[in-house]
């Protein structure tokens, strides 16, 4: 059995590429090479290059290791932080209690 490749819609693939570009810019701003980040993250230089290209075949753990090496590990907490659709669905399902009339 071969490796399965992640199937992404084009707009999702572009977003992942943007994430890769942002990671690369963070590295360049710090004046670090891909090799420097690879050593700090304990991954291969090729993995860093693939992350910077936004490769969907690199594991989320590797992306996090590189973010950690850049000092950006808390950025992972921003994923799905503001789930507008989920909150809307949740709000629609909340039932308001009915008021009971006083019997006197």
Image (spheres, grey):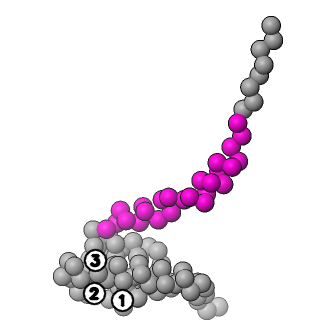
**Distance from Cα at disc 3 to Cα at disc 1:** 13 Å
As drawn, the label of residue 34 is 2
Q: Nearer the viewer, residue 31 or 44?
A: 31
Q: Is residue 86 left or right of residue 80?
A: right
Q: Splitting the image into 4 quarters, where does residue 70 fall?
A: bottom left
Q: Which mark is residue 74?
A: none
Magenta segment, which residues?
72-96
Q: Is residue 32 left or right of residue 78?
A: left
Q: Between 86 and 72, which is closer to the camera in this rendering?
A: 86
Q: Residues within 10 Å of mark 3 (few under 14, many from 20)?
A: some
Badge nearest the viewer, 3 or 2 = 3
| Prevailing secondary structure of the magenta residues | helix
Q: Which residue is depicted at the point 80% across and 7% down?
A: 104
Q: Is residue 44 left or right of residue 15?
A: left
- Verify CB contact (< 8 Å) between mark 1 and mark 2: yes
Residue 87 falls within the magenta-colored stretch: yes
Query: Which disc is residue 49 wearing?
Result: 1
Residue 52 at x, y percent in the picture: 37, 85
Q: Earlier in the sequence, mark 3 or mark 1?
A: 3
Residues under numbered marks 3 and 1 in contact, where contact means CB atoms less than 8 Å apart: no
Query: In the rendered structure, does residue 62 fall within the stretch colored magenta?
Result: no
Give the residue displayed 26% in from the left and 80% down from the top: 27
* Residue located beneath label 3 in the image: 26
Q: Note whether 99 is above or below 62 in the view shown.
A: above
């Amino acid at each position: 059995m071969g490796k399965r490749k992640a199937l992404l819609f084009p707009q999702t693939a572009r977003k992942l590429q943007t994430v890769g570009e942002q990671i690369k810019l963070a590295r360049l701003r710090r004046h670090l090479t891909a090799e420097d980040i690879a050593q700090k993250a304990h991954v291969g230089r090729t993995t860093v290059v693939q992350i910077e290209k936004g490769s969907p075949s690199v594991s989320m753990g590797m992306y996090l290791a590189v973010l950690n090496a850049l000092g950006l590990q808390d950025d992972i907490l921003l994923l799905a932080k503001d789930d507008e659709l989920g909150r809307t669905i949740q709000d629609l399902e909340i039932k308001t209690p009915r008021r009971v009339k006083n019997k006197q």
